[in-house]
Amino acid sequence: MSIVAPSGDCAENRISTITATGLPARHVLAVALGNAIEFYDFVAYAFFAAQIGRAFFPSDSPTTSLLASLATFGAGFLTRPLGALVLGRLGDRIGRKPAMLASFILIGVGVVGLPLIPPYASIGILAPILAVGFRLVQGFALGGEVGPSTAFLMEAAPPLRRGLYISLQAMSADAAVMVAGLVGIGLASTLDAAQLDRWGWRVALLAGGVIIPVGLVLRRTLGETLQPPRGVKPTLRSYGRIAAAGLALLAAATTTNYLLNYMTTYAGSTLGMPAKIAFGATAIVGSCGVVCDPLGGWLSDRFGRKPVMIIPWLCLAVAVFPCFALLERERTGLALYVACGILASASTLSTSTSLVAITESLPHRVRSGALAIIYALSISIFGGSTQFLVTWLTRLTGSALAPAWYMIGGVIVGLIALCLMPESAPIKVGIEGCRDE
C-alpha cells in the first residue's frame, strides 16, 4: 500500500491523496498499543494503589500509605512534558515511526520494571526510590507517545474518516481499561488479601508487559507519514489559539476520564464496597468506551466535531450529581455500575473527538510535537493530580460527593474551551474552505 499522507494544513490537503481506502488492521493495532499499555498500567496501578503503598511505603496509617502510593504514580507525570518535548519534536524532525519506536521501548522498561522491585521489607529505602525512578522513565516515554502516534493515524487516514481512525486509538485505551477491570475482578475473586499484597498486584502489572514485544514487531512494519517541508514554517502565533484551547479541552477531558478510572479506588476506599464489586466499575467504564469511542469518531466524521463534543458533555454535566448522590445513598454494586455506565458513555463520546479536533487543527510540520506537549501538560497538571486531590478532598471534607464537584468543574472548563475551538471536520469546512498555513 502506498500512502501520501493528508494533513490538517489546507495547502497540503489540496495536493495530498490516499491510494488506499485505509490502513491495514495490523498498522492501526501497532499505533494503538502504546495508548493501550498506558491505560492498562494506569488502571492496574489505581486498582492496587493500596497494595503498592503497603509494599513500598509501609505506614501505621492506611490512608498515608495510599497517598504515598498515589503520589508516586503522579511522579511519572512530571516527566511527561520533557518526553513530549524530546520525542514529540523528534516525530516532526526525523519521522513519526522512529519516535514511536523509541517511546514504546521506554514504555516497556517502565511497565515491566516497577512490579519486579522487591518490597521495602527486603531492600529498604531503595524500593521507593526505584519505584519513583521507573515511574519517571515511563512518564517520559508516554509524554512522547501520543503526539507521533496520533499524527500518524490522522495523516494515514482518508480525510472523511479521520475521526473514526483516531477514535480507534481511544478505543484501544478503553479496551485496556476493560481488560484491567476483568483482571482485577479475577484476582480479587481468587486471591485473599494477603496474596494480593504479596504478589497479586505484581501479576496484574506485569500482564501489561506481555504485549511489548508484539508492539515493537508491529511498529517496525509501519510506513512514514511525515512529509518534506513545504512553504513557510508555522509560528507559535499561527496556532497559539488552537494550542491554548486544546490544552483547556484536554485538561477537562483528562480530569473526567481519570475520575472515572478512579471509581474502583473510590468504591473500595470511600464507599466500603468489596474489592470484586469495586473492580467491576472499571470494567463497565472500559466497556462503555469500547462502544462509544468509535461511535463518537464516526458521528464526528458525519456531523462535525463540535456537536459530538458539546452535546455529550452537556449530558454529563446534568448527570454528575444525580449519579454520585445515588452512589452515596445506595452504596450497592448495581448503583455503582449504573452510575459508571451513564457517566462513562457521556464522557467517552466526546473525549476521542476532542483529540481529533485538536490534531487536525495543527499544522503538519509541528503536529507531533505540539500535540505531544499539549497532551502532556494537560495530563501532567490535571491527570497526575486528580486521584491524589480527590482522595485528599474526600478525606478533608468527609463528603462522598467530593469527586462530583471536581468532575463538574472539569466539565465547565471543557465547555468553555469548546466555544473557542474552530470546526475542523472536512465534511463541514471542506478541503478548499480551510485556511492555508
Image (cartoon, rainbow, N blue to C red):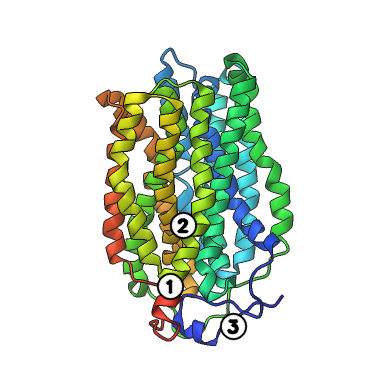
Residue on which the image places disc 2: 352
Residue 415 % position (x, y): 29, 56
Q: Residue 17 carries which label?
A: 3
User: The residue under label 3 is which amino acid type?
Assistant: Thr
- Residues 312 and 89: in front is 312
- x 73%, y 64%: residue: 221
Query: Mark 1 and 2 residues: CB-CB less than 8 Å, in contact?
Result: no
Do we see residue 1 in this rendering? yes
- x 63%, y 56%: residue: 102
**Residue 412 placement, left or right of 343:** left
Residue 350 % position (x, y): 41, 56
Residue 437 % position (x, y): 41, 81
Residue 428 % position (x, y): 40, 76
Please tell me which of labels 1 and 2 falls first in the chain.
Answer: 2
- Tell me: residue 205, above or below residue 139: above
Please tell me which of labels 1 and 3 falls first in the chain.
Answer: 3
- Residues 96 and 311: in front is 311
Residue located farthest toward the top when viewing the structure as drawn: 60
Please tell me which of labels 2 and 3 falls first in the chain.
Answer: 3
Q: Residue 425 carries which label?
A: 1
Secondary element at tag 3: loop
- x 57%, y 66%: residue: 153
